[in-house]
Image (tube, rainbow, N blue to C red):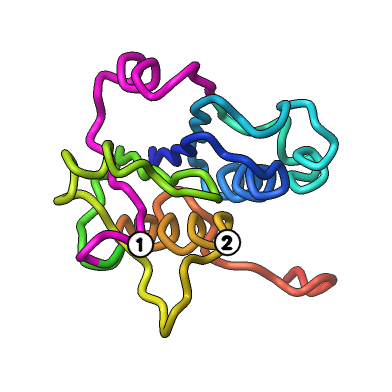
Amino acid sequence: MIHIVLLEPEIPANTGNIGRTCVATGTKLHLIEPLGFRLNEKNLKRAGMDYWKDLDVATYINFEDFMEKNNSPKLYMATTKAKQTYAEVEYDSDCYIMFGKESAGIPESLLKGNMENCIRIPMSGDSRSLNLGNSVAIILYEALRQKGFADLRMEGELHGTKE
């Protein structure tokens, strides 16, 4: 199972959208406090729609609590400060991909000891960053692609065309 880790997320709609993406992909969501919202907030539930009740989610009081409860997993850290892109690494089937809070990203103190696992999404010009929900989806789907989209439905059908 792939794990998405949000370090101190601030915007409930982003976390709700990410939760919906996690349900659709069979991905576990880890939320590291402090959160910029309450988990019962209307904006969070609206963005997550009716998927939120099916979400595999865990919360932690801080980064150390997360590391301890997950046996210090290898973390791919999404940051604009990385030298390698998200497509240049090979994701483990049980990988953890961490994203920082919307206003500041992952603190440099955490990045410094983990630069070999830091990944970035290429952007043009002076763009500082992408929306958090978009960033999670881009990198998560690359990890899923590398694993052959295991356990995901690979075909659809038009309404009213069952054969």
Write the residue at 29% across / 44% down.
108
In x, y percent, where is residue 56?
Answer: 56, 29
In x, y percent, where is residue 121?
Answer: 37, 68
The extreme bottom residue here reads 125
Quadrant for residue 140, please give it.
bottom left
Write the residue at 39% across / 21% down.
66
Name the amino acid, label 2: Asn
Say which mark, if any, is on residue 148.
none
In x, y percent, where is residue 157?
Answer: 70, 71
Judge whether 92 appears above or below 58 on screen: below
Q: Name the residue nearer the viewer: 56 or 105.
A: 105
Callout 2 touching callout 1 (CB < 8 Å) = no
* Residue bearing mark 2: 131
* Residue bearing mark 1: 80
Q: Is residue 152 left or right of residue 143?
A: right
- Which element is circle 1 on? loop
How packed mark 2 is, by other alpha carbons closer than 10 Å (few <14, some 14-19, many 20 or more), is few
Judge whether 106 appears above or below 161 on screen: above
How packed mark 1 is, by other alpha carbons closer than 10 Å (few <14, some 14-19, many 20 or more), is some
- Which element is circle 2 on? loop
Judge whether 62 appears above or below 155 on screen: above
In the picture, the quarter occupied by the C terminus is bottom right
Gap in angstroms between the C-alphas marked 2 and 1: 13 Å
Magenta stretch? Answer: 58-84
Q: In this view, does 74 lie to the left or right of 20?
A: left
Name the amino acid, label 1: Thr
Residue 86 magenta: no
Write the residue at 47% across / 75% down.
127
Q: Earlier in the sequence, mark 2 or mark 1?
A: 1
